[in-house]
Amino acid sequence: MPRFFFDVSEKDEVYHDANGTVLPSFGAARERALAIVRKLEPNPRSEDDLVCTVRDLGGRQLLQIRIQAGKPVVSLEE
């Protein structure tokens, strides 16, 4: 099963996931990223975005979820 890394940033603070999580699929990684941003969701009035970036073992960015005005915005990398 693939290992996915979930990096989280808000304002000037960045948490780089050094260990990663083994999950059965990309879909499971997307659901986990959504759960992370829901749990850490900032105040909807906040001007600072919360971002969760999903990477693969090689460091390639696969997905980015950004909370803007309290709503998730999902971007898939090509």
Image (cartoon, rainbow, N blue to C red):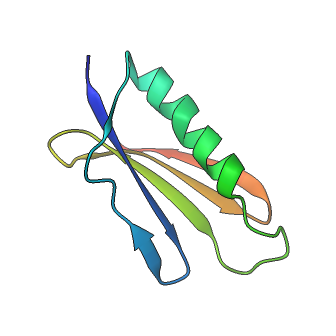
Q: Quadrant of residue 4?
A: top left
> Residue 71 vs residue 50: left or right?
right
Q: Quadrant of residue 22?
A: top left
- Closer to us: 17 or 69: 17
As drawn, 47 above or below 2 = below
Whether residue 12 sits left or right of residue 60 in the image: it is right
Which residue lies most toward the front here? 19
**Residue 14: percent from left, percent from top:** 42, 72
Q: Which residue: 14% across, 43% down? A: 58
From the viewer's side, name the closer residue of 74 and 29.
29
Image position, residue 35 (x, y; %): 63, 39
Task: Identify the image quadrant of the C terminus.
Answer: top left
Q: Is residue 31 visible?
A: yes
Q: Is residue 71 above or below residue 76?
A: below
Residue 78 in view, yes or no: no
User: What residue is drawn where x is 60% and y is 65%?
Assistant: 50
Q: Which residue sits at x=55%, y=81%? A: 11
Q: Residue at x 63, y 71 (%)?
A: 49
| Residue closest to the far left | 58
Nearest the eye: 8 or 19: 19
Q: Position of residue 15 (x, y in %)?
A: 40, 65
Q: Quadrant of residue 66?
A: bottom right
Work out which quarter of the rendered image holds the N terminus and state it: top left
- Image-based side of 16 in relation to 31, left or right: left
Q: Residue furthest right?
A: 45
